[in-house]
Image (cartoon, grey):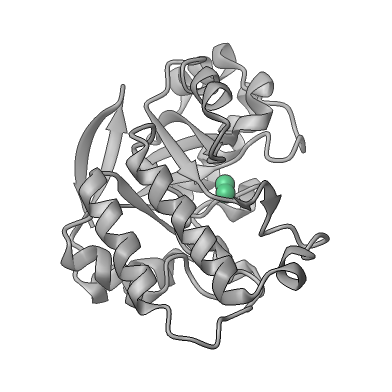
Amino acid sequence: MIDYHLHVVAHGDRPMTVENILAYCGVARERGIREMGITEHDRYLDDVDLAAFQEARESSQDVALRLGIEIDFVPGNEEEMDRVASALPYDYIIGSVHRVGGEEVDHPDHTEIYEKWETYDLYEAYYENVRKAALSGRFEVIGHPDLIKIFRQFPDRDITPMLEETADAIAESGVAVDVNAAGLRKPIGEIYPARDFLEMFHRRGVPIILSSDAHAPHEVAAGYDESLKLVRDVGYREVVTFKDRERGTLPL
Ligand SMILES: [Zn+2]
Ligand SMILES: [Zn+2]
């Protein structure tokens, strides 16, 4: 199995040393993860220590290491996104929407955006950004594609057409979707994406990665019992992998 979206430096919590990377690998090995991808947030790019990563990759036993990055997709920020995307020899790049109109939608201490916007409009704006991210051609993977549900703020109207349109754009773009178990640790208490959204992806042949979005070693592969059950129930039989921007597959 793979865990393809996680953070060692996280929010500046620890340096990217060989020892710290191998601590994540140790948990990964115990939990049956064969390939682990480190995807720091773009704003911590300067903390990514390529030499430490390469040394850890050499010495890691049983767990193959991949290097990615999680780029915060913000329309208008193309120059900076391109700078980050070309800074290091990544195996793949995750594009994630965390913001609407420049404001974060997932910050536990700053939820003002949910007061300012009518929820349906906020969802519209959020999914418009997700579609733009997919169609931008910058990313191999779209991270946690329904993050906007994090605080259980739901529109009072049906959002199925919005989700269908987003699944169409993602299928058209050819990117993979991040089935991310971090939602289980948030107020929403469920995986990103929700089952009905994942079914839309499956019907369109959109490939998936699996991830924990760990920000500490003990979170590696956290929630995988539920993730594996969900993706298998929906009908997925494989995940995609990346090396040097080339896609492979692993059976589930
Ligand atoms: Zn994210
Ligand atoms: Zn993340």
Question: Image quadrant of residue 62?
Answer: top left
Residue at x 83%, y 61% (from the top left corner): 109
Seen at 67% across and 59% down, the residue is 106
Name the side, left or right, on which 64 lies relative to 222.
left
* Res. 3 visible in picture: no
The residue lying toward the viewer, choosing from 43 and 216, is 43
Left or right: 127 as drawn, with respect to 155: left
Instruction: From this view, report whether residue 201 is shown above or below residue 61.
Output: below
Q: Is residue 91 visible?
A: yes
Residue 47 position (above or below residue 172): above
- The single residue placed furthest to the right in the displayed view is 109
Identify the residue at horizontal 26%, vertical 63% (top origin).
201
| Residue 93 percent across, percent down from the top left | 42, 33
* Quarter of the rendering occupied by the C terminus: bottom left
Task: From the top left corner, tell me how far across and down residue 146 is, in percent.
Answer: 48, 64
Q: Position of residue 161 (x, y in %)?
A: 33, 75
Q: Give x and y (percent) for residue 195.
A: 36, 76
